[in-house]
Image (tube, helix red, strand yellow):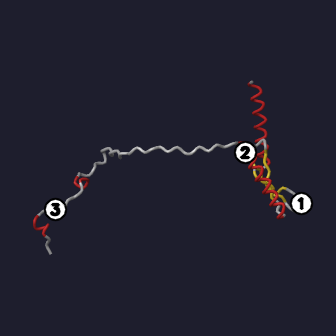
Amino acid sequence: MITSTAISGSRPELPEAALKPPRMASEAPQPVPVTPRAVVAAPRVAHDPVKLQENLRAAVDQLNKQLASSGRSLGFSYDEVANAPVVTVKSTATGEVIRQIPSEAVLRVAHTFEALKGLLHDATT
């Protein structure tokens, strides 16, 4: 069946982009327009290092109490020099340390660095 548009010779409207010739590979791409956005600053949260350390100590004490009452051999402590929590897994039968995170070697390195920082600081002042 022949439609009236085919008989009259008119063609449907095409978008303007479809009527443009294809872009050649050597032509530079056109930049995409960017609309400016309002920059929203993240809310500032005040952190008190002393309070955070106290909260960490309280959490460590609570975990140790809960694990001691359950008979598990998992210990939590806080290394002041390394400024890091330490998790120790012990054998309940022998008390031998099975695993420590961070390891004893890592803690020794942290302690050595702290001692060296003190020596270097004293030597430069």
Query: Dot 2: few (<14), some (14–19), or many (≥20) neighbours within 10 Å?
Result: few
Distance between the alpha carbons at the discs numbered 3 and 1: 92 Å
Residue 29 at x, y = what percent? 33, 46
Task: Provide the residue designation for mark 2.
Answer: 51
Amino acid type at mark 1: Thr
**Quadrant (top left/top right/bottom left/bottom right) for the C terminus:** top right
Which is more toward the observer, 49 or 26?
49
Relative to 46, is 17 on the left or the right? left
Of the numbered discs 3 and 2, the one sitting upstream in the chain is 3
Distance between the alpha carbons at the discs numbered 3 and 2: 76 Å
Residue 15 at x, y = what percent? 24, 56
* Up-down relation of residue 124 to residue 37 (above or below): above
The label shown at residue 84 is none
Of the numbered discs 3 and 1, the one sitting upstream in the chain is 3
Task: Provide the residue designation for mark 3.
Answer: 11
Q: Quadrant of residue 50?
A: top right
Tell me if residue 100 can be seen: no
- Point out the frontmost of discs 3 and 1: 3
The label shown at residue 94 is 1
Provide the secondary structure element on which disc 3 rests: loop
Amino acid type at mark 2: Lys
Residue 84 at x, y = what percent? 74, 46
Residue at figure coordinates x 75%, y 29% from the top left: 120
Q: Quadrant of residue 66?
A: bottom right
Amino acid type at mark 3: Arg
**Quadrant (top left/top right/bottom left/bottom right) for the N terminus:** bottom left
Relative to 34, is 66 on the left or the right? right
Tag 2–tag 1 contact (CB < 8 Å): no
Toward the left, the furthest residue is 8
Which is more toward the observer, 8 or 62?
62
